Amino acid sequence: MAELRFSALREVFNREPLETEIPTGNISAYFGDDVFDIHKMEHYLPREAFRQVKNAIEVGSSLSRQAADQVATALKAWAIEKGATHYTHWFHPLTDGTAEKHDGFIEVGDRGHVVESFSGEVLVQSEPDASSFPSGGIRNTFEARGYTAWDVSSPCFIVDTTLCIPTIFVSYTGEALDYKAPLLKTLSELDKAAVDICQFFDKDVTRVFATLGVEQEYFLIDEALYYARPDVVLASRTLMGHQSSKDQQLSDHYFSSIPERVMCFIKDFEYEAHKLGIPVKTRHNEVAPNQFESAPVFEEVNLAVDHNQLLMDIMKRIARKHKFRVLFHEKPFAGINGSGKHNNWSLCTNTGVNLLSPGKNPKTNLQFLTFLVNVIKAVNDSNEIIRASVMNETNAYRLGGHEAPPAIISVFLGSYLRSMLDEISRKVTDRKMTPALKTELKLGIGKIPEILLDNTDRNRTSPFAFTGNRFEFRAVGSSANCSAPMITLNAALAYQLRRFKKEVDLIIKKGRTKDEAIFQVLKKYINESGKVLFEGDNYSEEWHREAEKRGLCNVKSVPESISLYLTDKSKDVLVKSGIFSEKELNSRVEVEYDKFTKKVQIESRVLGDLAINHIVPTAIRYMTSLVENVRGLREVFNELEFERLAGARKELIVNISDHITMIKKLVADMIEERKKANKIEDAYTKAIEYEKNVKPYLDQIRVHIDKLELIVDNEIWPLPKYRELLFTR
Ligand code: ADP
Ligand code: MG
């Protein structure tokens, strides 16, 4: 086995950077080449069809059958011109990835000849038999039908020779089976709710869309080393491995120059991304060795989510070309930083105003404060579901370490805004405002600097930080589909804005002015949201104690945290608002429990196997050689000298033997616990059982393996070590 490790290392040492042919100069020359975007639609479509599509994108109106046919014809012509032979409805099932089933653009004509064909009907809807996707019990296999329906707001694109059509995925009975369908619902809810609020300030606002910029962190490891680590191949993370003597202590990787082989990979995937219209912009080395980040220019949320999913696909594909594997797991290596996906989130109006950016005058600043405070109130009130939306088996390894925000969701504002809110809370009363107070408040908020960037974003430990013109939700995991946190945030804010509108209207009805009413409700919200505001170090022990005192949600168990999706309070936000039906929400939660269980189960199996058939035999081999050595010493030396010489070796033999005994025992016990847990029917109880009684073995077993790694002869150790995984490329 050790041969595999050494031949892998030899392979890596011999690798050359793979220079690919990428046009230099203007990115705009090829940006979006492989996308049927609005400009191409205008070019390829008859005027009326184009008008309908544009409306469908902007206000969600539906397409006539005729227009759909015309789009299909144009799309086919464009795609075939670009060399496409197949098409697929591309969707986001409740797994960690995307799904596609390709069909050729062909049909057999009357005379048995093959013709290229693609109609409006197939563009708009398809029916993949998708019974094998997680549905949480919505579909039984005997009614396996699922439908995919075109999402007009995300443009079609070509990957390789396949035309991809972004779609939603619903069951025969209309329940959502994917992330996109509910995401679109929340975006439309948020649009309506936010426009109503904007109307208080600006009658020209008719549309509000949420924006998202996803900073994507990832690790790279060489392909040969990857294949020599069955745990990474099967469980996406290292389940064993002693810490490298040097890893990130010196912070010498962060922002350092990008290694040449990696640079070739990055240039290559960025080129592919740009052709697909993904505006990737920023690249840099991250904190941990072999960890990197890619960030795009922000876009409308639905598009940004599609683009992030697509980007991960592209990265995986291009990494193979460069003999790398990209790891999106949140915590591929113990003891060093894991990876997240910072979700930069804001709201933008059709008039081009960023609602979370301070404006130029008191009026726009009151609008800014209104949205700011409502976001805070939403995060305060929907704390549990926001947290649940990022809690899963893999991200739990990262949250709460001293490198990622804790799983306690708090909001960081920065001292300037914090004191602004304090001022409002101090000065505003329920009484009619005096002209003096009005002027004072207006003066105060009029002074908010337009660019707050320098005054904020100093706190890198906050899970939900205001960074000058947006919120940065940092607790999202690097492998996640951003839809889940986006659905929750959008829904929570939409729900909150509706309540705000009601409360303000009520006060206006009682004879107060609009501004008075707004100030009064904002004051109330500021007072009610105190518990979620935190400016200090989120990594500190004191904060954990303080958060508990404040009553902030910090349920440690992942399944238990997910179960909070189902409280009455959560259902008010997610079900009463029409985002999910009760059945859909239940099924989603069920899927999450099941994913959790299965991931722990896989890790446990992989670790058990490797421990017994890689590690134990290796340790025994080394022990045997020690025993031989002791026997040899006895032959060569007299009794007295033998005792003196053999002592340390005998100790080593006992030590190794003890670890072996413990590993075998712990693996056997773990298997017993799995068997017990597997008998449980109920998904929640089973997940809890796996978390409580199976998962702890992973660490316990690992301790012994990692100790053995330090003792056993390096020459025979079968698995690439951390120092090799992290520092060879
Ligand atoms: P940092 O590492 O300092 O947080 P980055 O430049 O790596 O910043 O990433 C910031 C991300 O925030 C980018 O994707 C950027 O496009 C995005 N962003 C900026 N403004 C907005 C906005 N109004 N809405 C959503 N995302 C935004
Ligand atoms: Mg960044």
Image (spheres, rainbow, N blue to C red):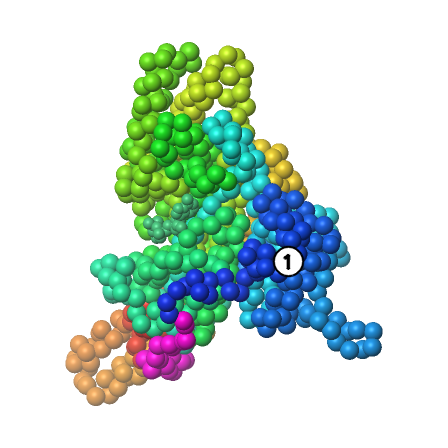
585 horizontally vs 344: left or right: right
Q: Camera-side residue: 430 or 599? A: 430
* Residue at 45% over, 75% down: 321
Which quarter of the figure is the C terminus placed in?
bottom left
Q: Residue furthest right?
A: 110
Q: Camera-side residue: 485 or 23? A: 23
Q: Camera-side residue: 22 or 419? A: 22
Vertical comparison of 318 with 553: above or below: below
Q: Residue furthest bottom?
A: 636
Residue hosting label 1: 45
Magenta range: 1-23
The quadrant where residue 664 appears: bottom left
Q: Position of residue 616 (x, y in %)?
A: 41, 72
* Residue at 70% over, 54% down: 67
Magenta includes 366?
no
The amino acid marked with disc number 1 is Leu
Which quarter of the figure is the N terminus placed in?
bottom left
274 horizontally vs 24: left or right: right
Q: Position of residue 382 (x, y in %)?
A: 49, 35
The quadrant where residue 412 appears: top left
Q: Residues within 10 Å of mark 1 (few under 14, many from 20)?
A: many
* Residue 124 is at least partly visible in this image: no
